Image (cartoon, grey):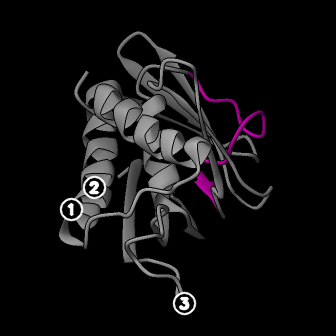
Amino acid sequence: MSFSIEATDLHWLEGIDEREDLCLHGHAVAYIGGRRLEYDATVSASALYLLKTLTENHVIHTDNQLFPCCGFSIFANETLDNVIICGCNNGIDWSVFHDRDKVILVLEDGIREEISLEEYKRFVFAFADKVEAFYKSCAPKILPNDKIDRDGYLAFWTEWHRRRNQ
């Protein structure tokens, strides 16, 4: 297999009420061109970033990592339908480029893998759906009182569902 992604060990941070932890964590693994990339990541941010790559190119180390360590701040745009997630510089990243009905994945060391857009979508959707199913299986979230944090979380899901249902 030239590409696959998986999230396992999904969990909320210890010591935080799961109803107040807005970011889901877990072990993220990607197989790209025979290479295994893995990281204990904020998989909720990973899923949204991967959903973005279905329609947008992603250049390694220019924005966020596709498997980020953290995503401690979520900022919504004015219309509350897109977000910017800020975290630290730790994580694992690779580039994603579109060429008609193909997706080209490029690792930091130059390894390239090509996959059909339909197959890529199938893996990204499965990853995102698993993350969302975990949210739905847990206690409902208590929205933050802070308007910026609340708007960020609500816009996160608005963007998620728009991109997932395109």
Pick the front one: 113 or 27: 27
Q: Are marks 2 and 1 in contact (CB under 8 Å)?
A: yes
Judge whether residue 126 can be spotted in this image: yes
Query: Closer to the camera: disc 3 or disc 2?
Result: 3
Instruction: Specify the amino acid type for callout 3.
Output: Gly
Q: Residues within 10 Å of mark 2 (few under 14, many from 20)?
A: some
Residue segment shown in magenta? 57-68
| Mark 1, residue position | 136
Who is closer to the viewer here, 32 or 79? Answer: 79
Q: Which residue has dot 3 on it? A: 15
Under mark 1, the amino acid is: Lys
Residue 132 x %, y %: 28, 55
Quarter placement of the C terminus: top left
Is there any visible trace of residue 33 in the rendered image?
A: no
Q: Earlier in the sequence, mark 3 or mark 2?
A: 3
Q: Residue at x 45, y 77 (%)?
A: 12
Left or right: 111 as drawn, with respect to 108: left
**Residue shown at the point (21%, 62%) measured from the top left:** 136
- In this picture, is 151 found above or below 27? above
Q: How many marks?
A: 3
Q: Is residue 65 magenta?
A: yes
In the rendered image, residue 113 lying in the magenta stretch gets the answer no
Q: Which mark is residue 132?
A: 2
Label 3, residues with CA under 10 Å away: few <14, some 14-19, many ≥20: few
Identify the image quadrant of residue 134.
Answer: bottom left
Q: Report crowding for label 1: few under 14, some 14 to 19, many 20 or more residues within 10 A (C-alpha).
A: few
